Image: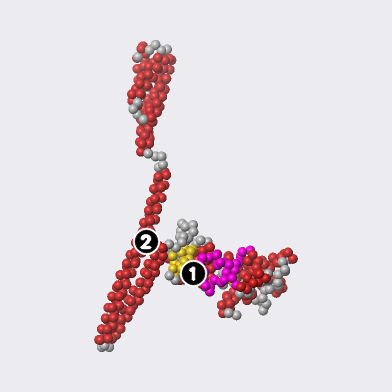
């Protein structure tokens, strides 16, 4: 048995089996082969299927893998020297229901970038399986690897969450090695990581590419419906970030080398070997000059990255300003300075009218009008004539006062006239009652 398979079997031995596992009679039934088809005995068929299907998924989950083969299942579920005879049928049923998929088929709909760096990792369709399918055998090859869809989705979600909660979340483009380090607690091996990334790519949450031999992964960013292709700008920023990291490592190494030269020079001086000590001191100065040049380059790269970050922040601010202006424009649609001034004028006119009404209702203005009406009553032959006289005079006054104003103010004058006519009506009624 291969070492890798032994490790997988030993890991799955920690699986907690259901209580039926200790029942010899029950397990004898579950280890027996399936009937030719389900219609022969549905109870027999469903009982075995409902037992083995969740157990297969749980065994893969326990060992942190998303793939399984029939050979691994036979070894994982070996009991008292016997292996289950119906696991091939279980796997075939899981394939038809979409719970598992051949690893080769799972990776079949990916771009050339994945295929190029998945050589030796993601399998191609085995010839043995193709021949058996053509011959109608229907048997599952022992070494065929199957992806458990439920588990690969769990790994993909965990990987995306780990990225979003990590310091790397500020960068959309990461190297494969960075992803490998990030997922060390999630994906136990590179195969599991690649399958999780393939699932994320199916969900449009990542895209992968090769750039100058580097395997790059781009994650979806907040606010995006799907991940966008890698742009030239993002590649340029990635190269700058990579240069920054390399320069930092080189500067640190040169600093350690300079310190080492200094310590060696001190030791040689104590031994009285001044010539050799001087040689180390010169070497130290040479290393320090080189470190200074690299540090200057490092500061230049950092400055460029800072300006890029600032420009991205400015772009976000500008987008916020633009959104605010658009919202304000919509809210002020149809509002003009002239309409606002007219509205203020109308409010002022109404306030003045209200003041006049309040004064009139106070009694002074009304009493004065009634007394004046009686003092001049001899000029009118009837109360109706008095009413007409007042209306005619006030109409002339209103035309003189409001003729040059806007329509809104003319309407206000009409309202005021109606109020005045109301008082005239009251005066007329008083005159009639006096007669």
Can I make out residue 2 in this image? yes
Q: Which mark is residue 109?
A: none
Q: Which mark is residue 183?
A: 1
Nearer the N terminus, badge 1 or badge 2? 1
> In the figure, is residue 249 to the left or right of 163?
left
Q: The C terminus is located in which quarter? A: top left
Q: Residue furthest right?
A: 40
Assign a secondary structure to mark 2: helix
Mark 1 or 2: in front is: 2
Residue at position x 37%, y 19% in the image = 392
User: x, y (%) of residue 150?
Assistant: 58, 65
Magenta residues, as a range? 97-126
User: x, y (%) of residue 113?
Assistant: 49, 67
Labelled pair 1, 2 in contact (Cβ < 8 Å): no
* Residue 295 shown in magenta: no
Is the residue 282 above or below the residue 30 in the image?
A: below
Disc 2 designates what residue?
A: 309
Q: The N terminus is located in which quarter? A: bottom right
Q: Residues within 10 Å of mark 2 (few under 14, many from 20)?
A: few
Is the residue 310 above or below the residue 351 in the image?
A: below
Viewer-nearest residue: 365 or 26: 26
Q: Residues within 10 Å of mark 1 (few under 14, many from 20)?
A: many
Residue at position x 41%, y 12% in the image = 382
Q: Name which quarter of the figure residue 351 lies in.
A: top left
* Residue 104 shown in magenta: yes
């Amino acid at each position: 048995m291969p070492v890798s398979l032994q490790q997988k079997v030993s890991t799955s031995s920690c699986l907690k089996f259901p209580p039926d596992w200790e029942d010899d009679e029950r397990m004898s039934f579950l280890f027996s082969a399936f009937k030719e088809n389900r219609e022969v005995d549905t109870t027999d068929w469903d009982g075995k299927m409902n037992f083995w299907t969740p157990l297969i998924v749980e065994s893969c989950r326990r060992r942190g893998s998303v793939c399984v083969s029939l050979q691994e299942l036979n070894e994982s579920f070996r009991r008292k020297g016997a292996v289950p005879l119906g696991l091939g049928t279980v796997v075939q049923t899981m394939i038809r229901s979409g719970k598992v998929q051949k690893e080769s088929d799972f990776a079949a709909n990916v771009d050339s970038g994945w295929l190029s760096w998945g050589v030796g990792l993601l399998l191609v369709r085995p010839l043995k399986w193709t021949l058996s399918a053509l011959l109608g055998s229907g048997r599952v090859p022992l070494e065929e690897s199957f992806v458990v869809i439920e588990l690969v989705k769990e790994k993909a979600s965990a990987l995306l969450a780990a990225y979003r909660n990590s310091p790397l979340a500020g960068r959309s483009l990461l190297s494969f090695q960075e992803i490998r380090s990030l997922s060390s607690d999630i994906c136990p091996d590179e195969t599991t990581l690649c399958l999780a990334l393939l699932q994320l790519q199916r969900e449009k949450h990542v895209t992968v590419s090769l750039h100058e031999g580097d395997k790059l992964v781009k994650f979806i960013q907040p606010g995006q419906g799907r991940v966008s292709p890698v742009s030239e700008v993002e590649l340029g920023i990635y190269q700058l970030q990579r240069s920054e990291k390399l320069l930092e490592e080189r500067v640190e190494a040169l600093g350690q080398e300079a310190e080492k030269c200094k310590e060696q020079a001190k030791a040689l001086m104590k031994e009285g070997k001044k010539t050799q000590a001087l040689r180390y001191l010169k070497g130290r100065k040479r290393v320090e000059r080189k470190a200074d040049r690299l540090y200057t380059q490092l500061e230049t790269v950092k400055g460029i990255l800072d300006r890029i970050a600032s420009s991205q922040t400015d772009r976000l601010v500008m987008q916020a300003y633009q959104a605010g202006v658009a919202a304000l424009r919509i809210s002020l649609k149809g509002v003009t300075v002239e309409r606002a001034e007219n509205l203020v004028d109308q409010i002022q006119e109404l306030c003045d009218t209200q003041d006049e009404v309040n004064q009139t209702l106070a009694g002074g203005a009304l009493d004065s009008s009634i007394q004046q009406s009686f003092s001049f009553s001899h000029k009118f032959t009837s109360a109706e004539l008095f009413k007409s006289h007042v209306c005619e005079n006030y109409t002339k006054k209103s035309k003189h006062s409001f003729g040059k104003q806007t329509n809104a103010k003319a309407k206000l004058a009409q309202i005021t006239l109606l109020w005045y006519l109301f008082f005239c009506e009251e005066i007329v009624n008083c005159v009639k009652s006096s007669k």
